[in-house]
Image (tube, helix red, strand yellow):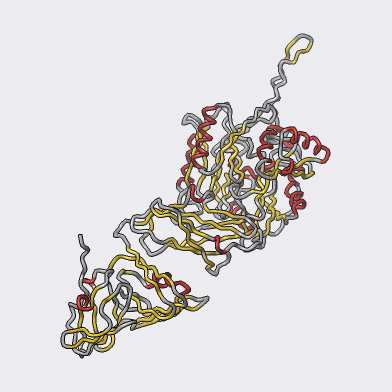
């Protein structure tokens, strides 16, 4: 717990005698704690300044996560953090300093002497009561594309601290929404995609009205689901940042105690809860554990700050525990720079439940580009021609997206990354791209990338190729890919692969105009898609494809076994496909057929007629990917099989 420092009136020498006053002398040193001061505890004034408003009215209210792009970090002066740490912050981003006008010169001298990048220091003149800016600072949200602030009822009667969200809203020109819940920043974690985490303090401080709490969190912050856990610490502070931390939408860090610790079971209960709870991407959280020995050994490792590409981890009093904690962060967050931060100042040093996260607050990048690929592909996937990757791209800058930079990067079986361009689906902000070229048993890595005209870019996952999304394709017979050039206009086409009609539609895309066979047809309608009476695909039929341009038509599937696909010729005209991957002479291909005199077969470029045991004409061989028309002069239907061609050994 945020360790209480007792003031003992002891060893007071009066007239040469030592008098020890032991009765009623325990008072919390509140300046070092989140705890209430003696005056606050005795005060009858428990209310705080607060103005309730209607919730944001946008269609897409979002509470960004700490691991999303940040434009600044807010701190308070006088400091609760080392000046060397302020220097590190200023070298990476803007630092917003809450300071009174009378103390600004002192702050300026302090930061200059520490070697801070003064170009990144911005002062906001306002009074504060404490340095726990995490708890009372603004909660920044997006209301559709507009940045805004949500203010709640601060759970401490410290009016200066309580007014900070209002003042910052005025300074930054942001709308402030008043959410009538008693809450605190140290007891809130969010993933930026609607999932939030707090412990049961949120219920205890709001009359245990869980329905009201969940409704408010959804309406003002877009938080749903909202995970409310037990408080494993069993401590007065009851803040989640004292025992856990969301590292990514699918990762959470949970402290681990020795089995001998009285709270061991509670910590394990919380870790098990997340290990069995799905993250926003559809699979259980990846739970990482950081060892904290408990007792008097300082180990505040979950109270860290994620700032863009860096994680600042407060270090404790034991180098072995420190090194192990840093290693856990590096394992969990490949791509990030992990930096340990010490604080040896006696009056403001780290405590097990109060370190650098409690004393800082990130300010989201108001112009960020957000990539929200929610339907993540994971686990084993059934074999299909392609897998659609759908994502939202939200440019909060208001600038246009770079349409040629909205991409799915993917690699198959550890090969080189390739890209698939993403195109608009017609839904707000939504684009889709397709992963292709895999086969049964393939291992596929991928990530989604976007950029906008303001210069912002973003990936999901954050470091893309360093730790991509991953899925496996089910085991089975290998699919084969067939490619044929389709000319502008009409084409007579067939395939030697077992595919479905949907695959053909996807392969043609918006370049296809019509697909016609002997018993049905479909046409592509702009802004609507394919429509018509053709519902299934027959692998031994010819299809007439009409295209608006020349394109490479690629389909994938298992090769057809000609011995199981008889070709039936009805009297008159028949549209037949060619189910073989090799070219074959007319006589060999039709060796299983007994033609009648007068039968003829036609391709797009030639024709041959059967007469007295011979095929005569300009058409001499069947070719893969082509389609043909056969006219039978027989008065009855008859069937034949194309021959099976064995591969040469």
Name the residue furthest top: 16
The total number of labels drawn is 0
- Tell me where residue 317 sits by quadrant: top right
Report x, y in % for residue 131.
71, 38
Q: Residue at x 45, y 72 (%)?
A: 509
Q: Is residue 482 left or right of residue 173?
A: left
Which residue occupies the foreground of this view, 288 or 518?
518
Report x, y in % for residue 449.
53, 56
Q: Residue at x 29, y 60 (%)?
A: 477
Quadrant in which the C terminus appears: bottom left
Report x, y in % for residue 601.
27, 84
Q: Is residue 266 left or right of residue 131?
A: left
Which residue occupies the foreground of this view, 528 or 347?
528
Quadrant in which the N terminus appears: top right
Residue 219 in view:
yes
Residue 212 in view:
no
Which residue occupies the foreground of this view, 128 or 519?
519
Report x, y in % for residue 368.
63, 55
**Position above or below: 127 against 549:** above
Q: Residue at x 48, y 31 (%)?
A: 258
Name the residue furthest front: 618
- Tell me where residue 371 sits by quadrant: bottom right
Q: Residue at x 61, y 41 (%)?
A: 305
């Amino acid at each position: 717990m945020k360790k209480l420092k007792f003031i003992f009136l002891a060893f007071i020498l009066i007239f040469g005698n030592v008098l020890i006053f032991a009765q009623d002398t325990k008072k919390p040193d509140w300046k070092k704690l989140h705890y209430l001061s003696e005056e606050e505890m005795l005060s009858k004034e428990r209310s705080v300044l607060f103005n309730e408003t209607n919730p944001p009215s946008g269609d897409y209210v979002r509470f960004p996560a700490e691991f999303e792009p940040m434009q600044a970090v807010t701190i308070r002066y006088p400091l609760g953090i080392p000046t060397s740490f302020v220097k590190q912050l200023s070298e990476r981003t803007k630092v917003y300093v809450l300071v009174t006008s009378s103390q600004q010169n002192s702050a300026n001298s302090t930061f200059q002497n520490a070697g801070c990048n003064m170009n990144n220091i911005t002062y906001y003149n306002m009074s504060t009561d404490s340095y726990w800016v995490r708890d009372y600072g603004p909660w920044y949200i997006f209301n559709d594309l507009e940045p805004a602030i949500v203010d709640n009822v601060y759970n401490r009667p410290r009016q200066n601290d309580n007014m900070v969200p209002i003042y910052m809203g005025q300074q930054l020109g942001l709308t402030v929404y008043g959410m009538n819940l008693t809450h605190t920043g140290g007891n809130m974690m969010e993933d930026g995609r609607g999932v939030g985490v707090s412990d049961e303090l949120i219920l205890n401080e709001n009359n245990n009205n869980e329905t009201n709490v969940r409704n408010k969190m959804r309406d003002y912050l877009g938080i749903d689901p909202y995970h409310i856990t037990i408080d494993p610490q069993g401590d007065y502070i009851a803040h989640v940042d004292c025992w856990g931390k969301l590292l990514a939408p699918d990762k959470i860090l949970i402290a681990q105690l020795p089995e001998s610790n009285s709270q061991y079971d509670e910590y394990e209960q919380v870790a098990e809860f997340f290990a069995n709870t799905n993250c926003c991407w559809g699979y259980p959280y990846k739970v990482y554990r950081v060892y904290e020995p408990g007792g008097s050994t300082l180990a505040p490792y979950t109270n860290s700050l994620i700032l863009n590409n860096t994680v600042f981890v407060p270090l404790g009093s034991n180098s072995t525990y420190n090194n192990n904690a840093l290693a856990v962060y590096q394992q969990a967050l490949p791509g990030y720079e992990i930096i340990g931060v010490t604080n040896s100042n006696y009056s403001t040093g780290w405590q097990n439940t109060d370190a650098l996260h409690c004393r800082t607050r990130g300010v989201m990048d108001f112009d960020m580009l957000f990539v929200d690929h929610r339907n993540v592909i994971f686990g084993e996937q059934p074999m299909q021609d392609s897998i659609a990757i759908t994502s939202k791209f939200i440019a909060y800058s208001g600038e246009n997206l770079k349409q040629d930079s909205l991409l799915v990067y993917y690699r198959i079986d550890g090969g080189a990354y390739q890209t698939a361009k993403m195109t608009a689906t017609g839904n707000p902000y939504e684009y889709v791209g397709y992963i292709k070229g895999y086969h049964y048993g393939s291992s596929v890595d991928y990530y989604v990338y976007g950029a906008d005209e303001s210069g912002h870019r973003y990936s999901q996952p954050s470091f893309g190729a360093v730790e991509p999304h991953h899925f496996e394709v089910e085991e089975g017979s290998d699919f084969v890919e067939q490619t044929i050039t389709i000319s502008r206009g009409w084409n007579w086409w067939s395939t030697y692969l077992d595919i479905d009609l949907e695959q053909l539609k996807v392969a043609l895309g918006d370049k296809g105009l019509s697909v016609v066979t002997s018993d049905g047809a479909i046409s592509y309608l702009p802004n609507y898609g394919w429509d018509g009476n053709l519902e299934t695909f027959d692998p031994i039929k010819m299809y007439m494809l009409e295209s608006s341009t020349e394109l490479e038509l690629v389909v994938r599937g298992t090769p057809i076994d000609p011995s199981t696909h008889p070709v039936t010729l009805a009297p008159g005209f028949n549209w037949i496909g060619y189910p073989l991957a090799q070219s074959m002479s007319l006589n060999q291909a039709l060796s299983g057929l007994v033609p009648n005199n007068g039968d003829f077969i036609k391709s797009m470029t030639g024709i041959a007629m059967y007469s007295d045991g011979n095929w005569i004409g300009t058409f001499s061989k069947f070719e893969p990917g082509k389609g043909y028309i056969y006219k039978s002069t027989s008065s009855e239907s008859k069937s034949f099989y194309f021959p099976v061609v064995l591969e040469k050994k």
